[in-house]
Every structure is written in structure tokens, then in C-alpha cells.
Image (cartoon, coloured by chain):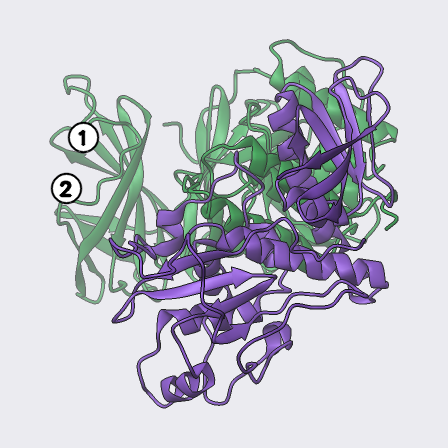
Chain colours: A purple, B green
Amino acid sequence: VTSAWWAGLPPIEEWISGAADNHRIRWSDGELSLLDHDDPDGEFLLAALGGEQCPCLRILDAWQRHRVDLYVLLLGSRGAADPLDMVRMTGGQTHGPRPTSAPPGGPSGPRPGPRFTAAVGPRPRGAAGAAHAGRPLRHRGGGSSGQRFGYTPIPRQDALAMLLSLPGGLPIRLVATVIAVWAERIADGDAQVAAVRPALQAALYGRAVAALRAWLGSDLSIDVRLADVPAASRGRGGDNVVVELPFSWLRDVWVRGFAVLAGRFCLTARQNGPDDWTFTAVDPDFGEPARFRLRTW
Amino acid sequence: MEMDGYDAETYLRLRAEQSLLAGGSCQVDYRLAGSARALAAVGVIDIELARRVVEDYTRARVLRGRYDTHPTAVTRSALAAPRRIVGCGHVINVTVGRLTVRYAVFDPAETRLALTLTLDDAQEPDPVEDHPAAETTETNPAITVTDDRGTSVTSSDLSVESDSEREWRGFLTLRPALNPGTRWIELLGERVEFPPDHPDLTVTIENFTDADAMDRYLAQCLTAVGNQPQSDSIGPAIEALRVAGLLEHHGVSEMMMFYQALRGPGPVAVKDEPWRSLSARRGATGGPRGTLLLGVTTPRFGGISVTLLDLVSADGGFRCGFELGGPADLGTHHDPGLSGTFVTFAGLDDRGNFYLGDTDEDECVGGGGTASGTLSFWPALDPQATRLDLIVTTDRARALINVPLTWEDTP
């Protein structure tokens, strides 16, 4: 079974403040959706003509533009031990607070289907993509070069700061989207990969080292190398660890929060079915990797 | 993907990731900048790419709330315009002691008088605030100076520093400028005469080839940390070049021995010059006491120009007032933008003794179109030396200013 890259990332819904009303923004199945806007393209046009632009639209546009942007991985958190400074990023503004009483079917309950959809991530080959409600943006799929008529996008640094300071689990889902795009490009032998290989390796390195340090402590010398086949070993003296991982480890393991499970460092994660996963992992003694299966009911 | 081979960008990015995870409070990873600069200097990575990596991770660090910065050692001033620099030596008795007008710099935009205030023995030391290096900007006395055309200008700035508790050196800046060709000025009620301009010193520019780029770069790093051996700006360069497989030959090992010697208390036997003479004379004293007017401006070389104003020799070393034009990186903390020309200062006398010069970055101030400060050289000048080459080195060329050691006075 080839799972979708967003498998293991549950849908989330967050409230965005800053406009006249708080608006809902939803991420599910690799897609970001605005739930309180019927015609984003029309609103973009109005904004270009001098009308007021809702923050949701800026978020949606920036998400679309930066969903393949490796700078997201450079700036984004490497894990729990690497928090970003939200005050710095947002200039003291926050996207909250949420309304004191959530609307019916609000964040934790059943959700209405999205009325508008954007930021479609890569799709697993051979797998049926999720159905997409709503009309696509005109520059959909254009990466960071898309341009709406008359609309000036937010500068890159500001856009990334905005996206990475979104509430809840939205930033990690943007990171997951970028990772998934590049993992797929690597698998496809995309010519663009060669030029950004150092950045891809750094993105893997920082996140894997952070996970390994959290697991093993910080006294060890840890070397993480990019490789086609995952492997892990401890040096003769026992004070250094060498871990070899493919870039897709970020997509399959790290993004899903599986890096360390049950006291083991996971090298692979494969979905067998809904809530049914098989992992390959190593113990702290770095013996032979072992497989174990996790099912939840 | 196959990533076993060495790649400089990958090295820098992984190095930056390590630093990012290690924490710290600095917004700029100066060790990363040092590594990037070294690899670019020896041609292993394009300077623009190296700069982008450093800037990328500076941004990542800022988003983690790391705001601290080192004092900048980078100046971005205009290249020096031609101007007249003339010695003086006139002494004015003032209430607290003696005020010596050492020399004057006549620039089209401003006039600067180099002054030394020597306190009388009866005076309490510390006449300027509470710190020897304090600049006086808010408590400036208003001093009016008149030139031979009757133009009067009131001082707009007075900066001072001290060599000792009883002697203060500084500049009185006058804007707008006095007549650049004036033969005398009136200062504190006295006429201060300027003698005829002294003959120009010989300046030689030597352009480098690509050969030996690494040795030159490391030598520059060593020179930059010569007065601050605990500074670690050379460490990242060494590590980066070692990982790149470039630190193998004898000359580098000699440099490394000298570097270790700088960081340790005792002497070390280094065979190659210039490190041998520096090691042998480390801590030497007995330098002649005297002052020379230099008043020389180099042509533009390596993207910069340098003016050396005067040379003051004392028991433990010697100092030069200087001004620097162009984007210059003085090396103690590498410019995170990697945009400045790496500039270092050294000296070589006619007896084969080498000297290292360094700027106190806190004293090197930009503004008014020119960065200026004081270079401190060690060890003490050899009293037997009769000529000294002051050497200003960039990554592309160096300037040698040949100075006859004929002392004008004995302060």
C-alpha cells in the first residue's frame, strides 16, 4: 500500500483574526482551504483595485506561492527543541484569539466541506487524490512564480514569517508540504534537485540531529548522512553515532512525529491501512534494526 | 542521492545547522562567516553562494530570537579624497597642562587637528569623564579656530583616547573646513604655524596572483588575531580548510604552530619567517620613543585605500593613526555579508623583524565619509632599525609604505 504523504497528519482547523471577523482556515489531505470565503479570486481582484484584503487571502496566496520553497525548511523549526520566536515573527500580533464559543461544527467537531481550496501538495503516484472542492486559483501549481493580475504578493521574508507563525499545526503542515514536494522530485529524478542538494541535505540533517539528540542526549557526536537506504550505527568507542537516511525519511517518519517511538529511533514508517503502521527502528544500542507494528483502535 | 564527495556549500550548511541547534544568542554565526570567507578566499566556493548561506542562516537565527551582535569590524566609507596632511608639533600651555598640535588633515569637507593633551604633574588624572577610552561628544568644549584667510570655524567634534592616565590623544574636527592651503591657524589665542609639507613617502602596490591564496589568507587571519589571540576568527577557517583537504603542507603547519603559540603563554620554535621573528620577539620591549608624521594615502588597491597619519613609538610597541576608504573587513569578526575587503596590517623593518598590527574595533569609527582609528603594532620596534615597511594587505594586493625611522620629537 502506498500511503498519501499526508497520511498521519490529521485535519486541523484554525481561526484567523485580523479582518472584521474571525475566519476559519482548514488543512486536510494536503490542502489548505478557506471556509468563510466564497470567491477568493474575486476578492483578490478587489484587493488589487484598492479594496480591503482579508488576512485569510494573504495566507492562502502565500501558502500557494511557498509550498515548494525550500526556504520554508531553512526557517522552519527542527523540532520541539528548536522553537521559533513568534513575537519576533509576527511583530507582536497573533492570529488568535479564537471566539469564546466555537461555532457549530467548529474546530474539534465535524467540519463542513471546504468552499475553496488551494495549495495542493504532490500526490502519491497511483493513488487517487482527494476530491477538491471549490474553484482553483488561477496560478494554481505555479509555485512561487505565480502572479495574479494586479495583485502584489507579500515579500518572501514577510510571507514566510507569517506562514511559520500560523496557529496550531499549520506551520508543520506547510513544512510537510514542501518536504513532500521535494521527496517526490528526488524520486522522479527531477533535474532541479541537483542544484538544491546541499539545502535538502541540511534540512534532513538538522531535523534528524535534533531528533537524535532528544533521544540520546547531547553528549554524543552525531553524524547524519544522506543515503538511499536507511541505516544507523554506533562507533567503536560508543561516543559517536552515524545515521544514514534518505530525504524521504522526513516525509515518512519525521513529519508524522514518528522519529522516536517506544524508545526507538525509527528509520522507516509504512502505513498498512488506516491506523495501522509498520516501523523499522533501532534501539539505543544500535543493534540490528527491528520491525514492529502499531495499530490503534 | 550520492553525497559522499566533499561539497563546500553542503559543508557550510551542515555547519550552520549544528550551530543553529547549539543555541547561543548571536544573530550572526560568526564562525560560519569565518568558514565561508575562508572557502571563498581559496576558491572552493563562489563568494555569492557563500554569502547566501550565511545570510540564510542569519535569518533563521533571528527568527529564533537571537538578537545579539558583535561590534562591527566592517567599515563602509568612501575612498579617501586627495588632501593635505601636514605636521606641526606646536605646544600650547593650557590650564591643566600642555596641548600639542601633532598634525592637521585638510580635507575639502572638514579639517581635523590631531592633538595631545599632557597633564601637569599637579593635575588629577582622568580629566575626561571616567573611562580612558571614552569619546567626548556631548561634553565637547566649543573651540573656535581661524585660518590665514580669516575664516573662523567652531569645533563640531572632539574625540579623545588615552595612552596613559596623564596623556590624552584625539582629534578636533572642524566643519566646514578651513582653507586647505592655510599656512597657519589661530587656536586658543596662539598662532600655530605649519611648516612646508614634507616629502611623500614611497608607496608600492603589489598585486597577488591566484597562487598561494590559502597561505595568504591564513596569514591574514593570523595577522588579524595577532593582538587578540583568544579571538577565534581563524579557528573556523582552519577547520573549513582542513575538511576541504587543503591543510597539508609545511607552511601551514608552521602557521598553526604560531597560532597555538599565540594562544599559549610560552615561546615556541617556529622556523619560517615571518612567524619566527614574531615568536622570538614576542613580548619584547625597549622600543624607541618618538613620533613621525606619515601623512600618506595609498592609491586604490583591492577595493580600498588607506591613509596612514602618524607613527608613535613607545617602549612596548608602536601605533599608527589611520583612515580607511572602501568596504573593509578588519577581520576580528568576519563581516556576515562577506562584502568587505579583508584588510590586515603588518610591518617589516630593515633588520628583518616582523610586526603585527591590529585595530581596536571599538575605536574604528565610520562617519563623515571616512573610517578612522588607531593601529597597534607589536612587538616593540627594534631600536637598531632605520627603515620600516608598513604593509596593508588585502586578498588581492598589498601596499608597502616605506618609512624612514627619523624621529621628529621625543614625547
Mark closest to the chain's N terminus, 2 or 1:
1
Asked whether B236 or B133 is in front, the reply is B236
Q: In the drawing, does residue A43 fall left or right of residue A51?
A: right
Taking the view exactly as shown, the residue that stands out farthest to the front is A297
Q: In the drawing, does residue A190 fall left or right of residue B262?
A: right
Give the CA separation, mark 2 to mark 1.
9 Å
Asked whether A160 or B190 is in front, the reply is A160
**Residue B68 pos. (x, y %):** 41, 39
Residue drawn at point x = 36 percent, y = 60 percent: A15
Residue drawn at point x = 34 percent, y = 57 percent: A95
The reply to whether residue A244 is visible in this rendering is yes
- Which element type, helix, strand or loop, lies under badge 1? loop
- Which element type, helix, strand or loop, lies under badge 2? loop
Residue placed under numbered mark 2 in the picture: B139
Asked whether A13 or B75 is in front, the reply is A13
- Please tell me the numbered disc located at residue B401: none
Output the chain of dot 1.
B
The kind of residue tagged 1 is Glu
In the rendered image of this protein, does residue B321 appear above or below residue A265?
A: below
Output the chain of dot 2.
B
The reply to whether residue B39 is visible in this rendering is no
Residue placed under numbered mark 1 in the picture: B129
In the rendered image of this protein, does residue B82 appear above or below residue B12?
A: below
The kind of residue tagged 2 is Thr
Q: In the drawing, does residue B12 fall left or right of residue B65?
A: right
In the rendered image of this protein, does residue A199 appear above or below residue B244?
A: below
Asked whether the residues under the numbered discs 2 and 1 touch, taking CB atoms below 8 Å apart as contact, a structural biologist would say yes
**Residue A280 pos. (x, y %):** 79, 34
Labels in figure, total: 2
Give the class, few, some or many, for how many residues have Cα within 10 Å of label 1's Cα (few <14, many ≥20): few
